[in-house]
Amino acid sequence: MDKIGYGRQYIDVDDIKSVIDALKSDSITQGEYVPAFEKALSLYTGAKYVVCVSSGTAALHILYAALGLEKNQEIITTPNTFAATSNACLYLGGRPKFADINIDDFLIDENNIEKLINENIKIITPVHYAGLTCNMQEIKKIADKYNLFVVEDACHSIGSFYKGSKTGSLEYSHGAVFSFHPVKHITTAEGGAILLQDEAIYKKCFALRSHGIVREDFINTPTSPVYHEMQMLGFNYRMTDLQAALGISQLKKLDGFIKRRQEVAEIYREAFKDINIIMQKKYDDRINSQHLFPVLFESKAIRDKVYYYLKEKNIFTQIHYMPVTAHPYYEKLGYSYKDTPKAYEFYERELSIPMYPALSDEQLDYVIDNIKKAVMS
Ligand SMILES: Cc1ncc(COP(=O)(O)O)c(C=O)c1O
């Protein structure tokens, strides 16, 4: 069997044609494709404003900045995430705080948030890990009580739903971010997007994406020939038109991708119901768009055994995630894995098994068969 990874992009002839068309267009960055992709994402999610950027990390960085996160201010997020969620806070001189997770749904436990709140906290950033949305109603309640912003790190969860509202519609938050890294639901090779409802925050993100320089008529009604002026210290976080062209073409296929991911998830759930592994909890009022399929084994020893067994069979799984509190860099900053013991226990027992739309039935059978054999070996 050919190599099977835990995730993989799906690129077809339409994607290739779309990028070639963009290559032949007048401008290959900041031309017509980026605004067209932003409009398509706005239509898909229901967000009023969308700013496409060069990565999910860039999206988090400038969204935190646009919300006014400053030196020594704090965010609250989950330790079970890619480090970018909290790194973006460090970039601004802020200090992330980590609320431990639930061991059944693998998401931030909203009951651990309130005790971390003090006068420095500015933002709560739930991460919809693996494609399952967090308890947004409770998180919004806490944020409203203390007048905090909510940023959804939705890098795993485009196309998911919470109580009937689509991720990105921002019913429970001030903004959301997507990543279009190749293992995500749709890809632009590298890329990300910020979704917003508020015009003032949108204008800041728009400016911060490109050095803080904007056309005068973006801010004021021009009184003289239009010029570009630097309003704030920004970055070069622009998405190119080539990336946006790929994004536009990928987005057309997104619902089909999600459908296959959900099918794969159901096949796994059925296949593993009689063996001793824990799968992510299902909720009646949430629809998981299945970026990952994380499973928890009984112990670290069994998890490690399965990992190596599968590797021998050309099946490459991965661990998502080492808790951010446990990374050596964070330890140097004074954090410890002991701060978030459930996330650490999760990390020791977890594996993300293959989950992507191009996974064939034959490959899926092969993966399931080998996982069962590995557990029993
Ligand atoms: C939860 C989460 N947040 C943020 C990011 C950062 O996105 P990017 O890789 O596009 O910078 C990722 C990407 O892996 C992620 O999984």
Image (tube, grey):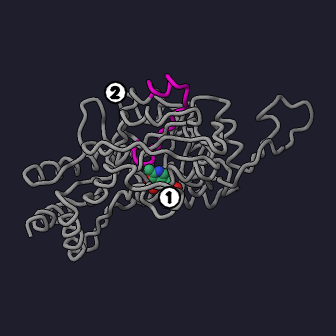
The residue labelled by disc 1 is 330
Give how far across and how far down residue 76 sits, in percent: 49, 40
Q: Secondary structure at mark 1?
A: helix
**Would residue 19 appear left or right of 159 to someone viewing this image?**
right
Mark 1 to mark 2: distance in Å? Answer: 35 Å
Q: Secondary structure at mark 2?
A: loop
- Residue at 56%, 36% (x, y): give it: 121
- Residue at 54%, 50% (x, y): give it: 192
Segment tinted magenta in the rendering: 140-158
Mark 1 belongs to which amino acid?
Answer: Tyr
Give how far across and how far down residue 175 sits, in percent: 54, 35
Magenta span has 13?
A: no
The residue labelled by disc 2 is 163
Q: Quadrant of residue 28?
A: bottom right
Q: Earlier in the sequence, mark 1 or mark 2?
A: 2
Mark 2 belongs to which amino acid?
Answer: Lys
Q: Is residue 27 above or below residue 168?
A: below
